[in-house]
Image (cartoon, helix red, strand yellow):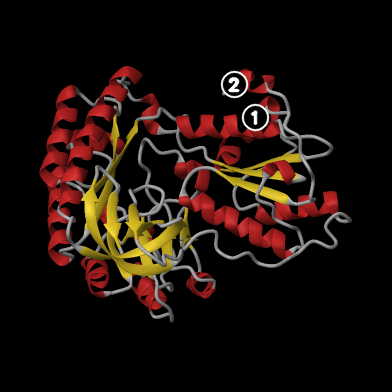
Amino acid sequence: MRNKLLHNKKPAEIHHTYGVSVITLGCPKNIADSRALKERLLKAGIEIVDSPAEASFIVINTCGFIEDAKKESIEEILKLSRLKKNGTELIAMGCLIKRYKKELERELPEVNAFFGLGEEERIVEYIKKKTVKSFCHARASIPQPFSPYAYIKISDGCRRRCTFCAIPGIKGRYKSVEPESILRESEKFISRGAKELILVGQEISSYGFDRPEFPSLKELIREISSLSGDFWIRLLYLHPASITDELLMEIASNKKVCKYLDIPLQHSEDKILRLMKRPGSKEAYKGLIKKIREIIPDVTIRTTFIVGFPGETEKDFRELLDFVKEIEFERLGAFKYSREEGTVAFHLKGQISEKIKQKRYDQLMKLQANISLKKNLLLVGKKFRCLVEDVQGSTGFGRLENQAPEIDGMVIIKGKNLKPGTFIDVTVKKAYDYDLEAEA
């Protein structure tokens, strides 16, 4: 997994402030975990610094979900190891460490300490023991939100056993977060000015499944929406088998919940779904999408598909393309199948070459770009509420309710007196494959 060429560059000059820099890779759930670590560090009197080059400790929160994510994590560790000078320590945490700790301890002597999942307190204790004198006067104020939106993890682990997925082996069984903790965190971010609360988990539609005394997802979002303030609630991610009519009705009627559903389907063909051990079928998915669009007429549906799964024939792939053409998802992402150790699919016959996977991926995303442009053109001339995230000169950058941060397109805004972290009304003037131009 190592890239030895990364060692050839000259180490960067650094200037210590006896602080900790936390680098986050991977999904929004990792962002939530990194934020929790930062707050623990601050409460312990340990300062957070933005630049790794100015830190005494660099913490990397890794991702180990698929091959590309693993490579990115290793490359980032090696890149940051070049900043080690005059006692700087490098700490690796998260999914990749949980999955490959023994191997990484052997292969990465550049890393001073390895921590898996849920070990934030151990990381704090490790740093405190190393630097008890250095941090005695550190500033322990809680920082303001890094952006107008905040990820709030409401569950961890997974109750499913999809044959392609390593997450259950990394994260373990499904665990719902205490509702009181979720509400406290929601109130905290609202008080700091967050305008969008994004509820995340492997599949949040199963919230409360493991704890009968907990509210359902429908009841939870109703409680969050009752909090004072002007904000959106976004739901990431919903498993198709766990979506109830009651949840859909709540989303449709609740003004604070984004009419945006992220529902990873993974494939359309029954044969492949069975090999993936995914409940459902093509007809069931068609029925679910039809029902969602009837209950929530202005809904944006986002999904993801895996191409090149073992046994996927050219016919299966063509059927998937036809399914996408028929449904016309507003948002769609794709992954090339990654053969992961410890998964059932690793041993399946009919493994597909990387060349064919890439070809199928490119075809699917080209099709979706055309669908996305078609959908975006329908928005031209219409007025929408927009969350402003950044302003550069007279140009603003924001998102509509139907655009999730970091994965969807954005709105480029022309207007006066634009202010980050505020809602404004905009009129869409131009449309592109994924982005929009609008005037305030």
Q: Eyeballing the image, is 47 above or below 85?
A: below
Separation of residues labelled 1 and 2 (CA atoms) = 8 Å
| Residue labelled with disc 2 | 3
Q: Which mark is residue 78?
A: 1
Taking the image as shown, residue 9 lies to the left or right of residue 285, namely right
Quadrant (top left/top right/bottom left/bottom right) for the C terminus: bottom left
CA neighbours of label 2 inside 10 A, class few (<14), some (14 to 19), many (20+):
few
Q: Eyeballing the image, is 239 above or below 143?
A: above
Asked if the residues shown at circle 1 and circle 2 are in contact, with their CB atoms under 8 angstroms apart, the answer is yes
User: Reading the chain from its start, which is encountered first: label 1 or label 2?
Assistant: 2
Is residue 278 something that shows in the picture?
Answer: no
Residue 383, x across and y down, in percent:
22, 65
Q: Which mark is residue 421?
A: none
Q: Amino acid at mark 1?
A: Leu
Could you say which is closer to the camera, residue 135 or residue 95?
135
Could you say which is closer to the camera, residue 39 or residue 397?
397
